[in-house]
Amino acid sequence: MAGLQGSGKTTATAKLARYLRLEHGSSVALAACDVYRPAAVEQLIKVGAQAGAAVYEQGTDRDPVKIAAWARDRAVSEGKDVLIIDTSGRLHVDEVLMTELAQIKKAVKPHDVLLVVDAMTGQDAVAVAEQFATVVQFDGVIITKLDGDARGGAALSVKAVTGKPILFASTGEKLDQFERFHPDRMAQRILGMGDVMTLIEKAEATYGEEQTAELERKIRKQEFGLDDFLEQLAQIRRLGPLQSLLSMIPGVGKELRGTKIDERDFDRIQAIILSMTPDERRHPELIKGSRRLRIARGSGTNVQAVKALIKQFEQMRKVMRQFTQGKMPDLGALMRGGR
């Protein structure tokens, strides 16, 4: 793993390790060869543990080339499938950095050299990639901080300038916000056309077949209650930030670009539902008068918020019933009623 300091290289190393472990069942080890940046080794140990990868380190007072060679031999002896070497970054491209990378590459003979670039730096990311390409041959790119559609242009430019494929994209701070990069999907996001395939893949990874079948049964039998609604909200949150999910829906991302969505609304909804009794969650039509006041106090909200949630939930159930009956719901009336 190569890249400038501040590009998110160490975190990307852990994200790649997690991806390989979960998606391919690989046994992964990380080599801590960034011996110059303060706390870099400690950071790799921390994120490596979170990713479920072994971390090989020898502190900061040894030659990173020797650490890399030692880590490779240890990975082989311990039967690891993959060794990812986190190399040192610099504030800018310099001769010392390039020489060290070349020495590590010669010492360990890696199958792949991946360059990590920061999408937030815009066209500077393209310049950095071009400089690395002329001095240290790399095989592919991981682009980080790609959590905004406007930054996708830099990603496409990196590919055009260097001719090297962008293999992965880091779309947030959490370790699971890491995915294979699909240029056609990124182009669709930039053009406001959404990214349905990525949304579907996220949903398939989150929802199990049994969960989906049970949810369908409850909807058809009109047994879908507020407990089920709460579980669906939790599932949505597992898919990722709501803002990024909306950008994947065709026709929505462009309209909402720049709009800030307060995800604390999820917490308020959860607090309201959890303040209800099990019977009230199954039969929200019971919630009137003093029940509303009790729930509002218990959730730290107000009666109006409780009334609004129940009204929106009933409208959602009405739409579900219409779908199961083969009818097209009146979405216009639904949206007017939810305001």
Image (spheres, rainbow, N blue to C red):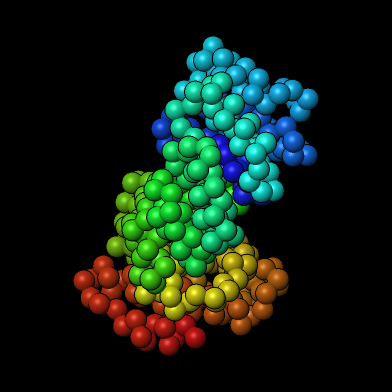
Give the quadrant of residue 198: bottom left
Q: How far from the left and from the top, in percent, is residue 12?
A: 57, 43
- Look at the image and tell me whether residue 40 can be seen: yes
Return the residue nearer the eye: 292 or 96: 96
Instruction: Judge from the rendering whether residue 328 lies leftward or rightward of residue 90; answer left or right.
Output: left
Return the residue nearer the eye: 253 or 190: 190
Instruction: Judge from the rendering whether residue 154 lies leftward or rightward of residue 326; answer left or right.
Output: right
Q: How far from the left and from the top, in percent, is residue 53?
A: 58, 29
Q: Residue at x 44, y 38 (%)?
A: 139
Q: Residue at x 60, y 19 (%)?
A: 69
Q: How far from the left and from the top, in percent, is residue 210?
A: 35, 46
- Look at the image and tell me whether residue 314 can be seen: no
Q: Is residue 316 above or below residue 221?
A: below
Q: Residue at x 27, y 70 (%)?
A: 323
Give the quadrant of residue 25: top left
Q: Is residue 190 above or below residue 290?
A: above
Quadrant the N terminus occupies: top right
Q: Is residue 162 above or below residue 230?
A: above
Work out which residue is located at the far top of the displayed protein and give it: 77
Return the residue nearer the eye: 277 or 35: 35
Return the residue nearer the eye: 242 or 264: 242
Tally of marks:
0
Q: Is residue 115 above or below residue 160?
A: above
Q: How far from the left and from the top, in percent, is residue 132?
A: 54, 44
Q: Residue at x 31, y 71 (%)?
A: 321
Give the quadrant of residue 194: bottom left
Instruction: Judge from the rendering whether residue 147 lies leftward or rightward of residue 327; answer left or right.
Output: right
